[in-house]
Image (spheres, rainbow, N blue to C red):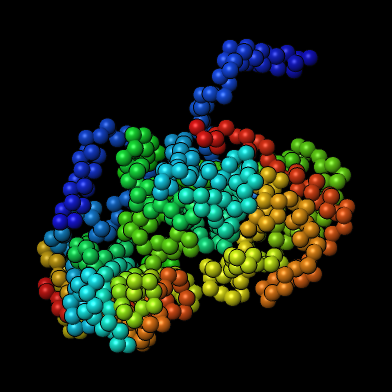
Amino acid sequence: MKRVAFVFVLSLFALCAACDREVVDPPPVDNTNNNNNNGNDTTPPTGNAVCLDITHVVGALPLRLDQTLRYQNLNGDSFSVELVKYYISNIVFMDSAGNTWAEPESYHLVNAADELSCKIYVENMPAGVYNSVSFMIGVDSARNVSGAQTGALDPANGMFWTWSSGYIMAKVEGHSPSSTQAFDVYVFHIGGFGGQYAGQRIVSPSFNTAQAIVTSTTVPLISVNGDINEWFQTPNVIDFSSLNIMNTPGPTSTMFADNYMDMFTVTSIQN
Amino acid sequence: MKKFLVYSVITLPLTIASVFTGCSVDSEIPEELTKEDVKFYVPSGFPQPAYNFAANPVTIEGFELGRKLFYDPRLSRDNTISCGSCHMQAGAFSHIEHRVSHGIDGLLGTRNAPGLWNLAWHQTFMWDGGINHIESQPLGPIANPVEMDENISNVLVKLRNDGNYPRMFEAAFGSDTITTQRVMWAITQFQGLLISANSKYDQVQRGEAQFSQSEQSGLATFRSKCASCHTEPLFTDDSFHNNGLSPEPTVMDPGRMHITNDPADSLKFKTPSLRNIALTGPYMHDGRFSTLSQCLNHYTGTMYPSATLDPQLTSGIPLTAQEKTDLLAFLATLTDYTFIQDPKFKEQ
């Protein structure tokens, strides 16, 4: 329902823009319509593309964003998950001959509450047989020091620290009776873009022997599991009683970054 | 004589005009800006700026939009606080006579609002350097709960629903789409053009004026005892130092360490530029000193001992009474009256 309302508001804007006075000059630099899947262009491509379709889970259970304490981490804390957002950027595909293709302007904000954002269409790909992918969880350091960005990187998306410039690479929030915070909340915002406390991680979830065959008329569907429980385990077991709030780069934020490196598993590829 | 005639020819009609306008002198019609007015330039002797306007070229429309945003209280949650509330042109865009500023709901901050000038030359912003780009800077005070306490998404909604802004964004950026980036670009066009380079000090550098003997002696003292941090011509090294101030016990501001989490940065704050310093009191990151004499007395006094105290300040800065007098005379030459009176920076 929310989405319908959102699309409706968008259409209103579009209508208003359409019937507006004539536009004299093209904008000097107009990258307001970035290649991102945050609402601007929602028509799925019909070829020369792949779809990374992320299904979020918490361990063996599907992710449900509500206050029910249905999950348990490796430490034994029970918890709910109510918000999950993270960046996927700098997507690179490799074909069977070892050639790589990097998506230009590759910034995607995944919001578990927005199904659309969990299907990342990577478009304008050369036809080919691809057998691996790599991408960054988070935003590269360059975009953290380059001033006001737009599209997926718009600070209005709630993923930018205004007091200490830089993107929140990933965030998860919910409740846990183990937490010592008021109302038993836990809030983990993982940021920091440079030096020893950088929160970005480059990952390459394996295709195993599967391949994504891209042609001008096919869009392979790469199904990926994103396990939020991995944020709290391997290599660092997070104990919600001692660590339940984090909103600054530091030694604890890198524990989460090291943990979420293995959150993704490719479950199938349909060509 | 000829000069006098020319002068009269110019001023006479002006005088007549002002007689006719009489009591409406203050309700002046804003002057039309020219392209020259909004041209970014590097003053003679200045280094290359940190910010490159190539991706955000200044236009009359963009500058005017940025100026409107700078003075618009709708950037705050309850539409009461604008950037200009705490950054007043008469004080070189500092908050005149405010140790710290009162933001939304009368809440007080913990740090002194600095003056704004020559920002395009800065790599870092705020006393702790937490903001790393001039375009990202306005997001800090907008979101700060004791300053404007507003969500940038709400600001965008307010601007989109306004009767004038969409038209102004279209004039500035070619379409009426209002995004965070465009808001920040426009404010950057305004803030980036706050160039202060016409103080007596600058005029002396250009050979257009001469220092008095006291000012000249003050400059010599300045260069030998202050300039390693307050480096000419920007009068800041854009870096962070612990200058021996005791931490205020109710705040215990860690300074730069708040951003880096590095104990080596404890109690370090960004070196403020000394340009326009006579106008920007109270002084220091927490506004603890009301006068420049107090600042000098701090440096000749006992430094608060800590591991991060700047090594150059271990025993403070020795200054004779005469040196202090001369330094104050020199510092007064850093006031740029053209800058604080420039009509293009005024709220329209």
User: Closest to the observer: B278 or B222?
Assistant: B278
Judge whether A78 appears above or below A122 on screen.
Answer: below
Q: Position of residue A156 (x, y in %)?
A: 35, 55
Indicate whether B173 appears above or below A223.
above
In the image shown, does A136 or B299 lie closer to the viewer? B299
Q: Quadrant of the N terminus of chain B?
A: top right
Q: Is residue B164 left or right of residue B224?
A: left
Residue B96 percent location from the top left of the image: 63, 44
Most distant residue in the front direction: A183
* B199 over A224 or under it: above or below: above
Where does the image place residue A238, in percent across and percent down from the top left? 36, 83
Residue at position x 62%, y 61% in the image: B270
Q: What residue is shown at x 15% (from left), y 56% (from top)?
A: A1
Which residue is painted at 78% across and 38% down in the image? B209
Q: Residue B107 versus residue B156: which sits nearer the camera?
A: B107
Name the residue nearer the viewer: A265 or A112: A112
Question: Would residue A40 be found to the left or right of residue A158 on screen?
Answer: left
Residue B82 in view here: yes
Number of labelled discs?
0
Q: Is residue A97 visible?
A: no
User: Which residue is drawn at the image coordinates 60% and 71% (left, top)?
Assistant: B265
Where residue B102 sits: x, y (%)?
54, 50
Left or right? Give the position of B140 relative to A234: right
Q: Is residue B194 above or below residue A108?
A: above
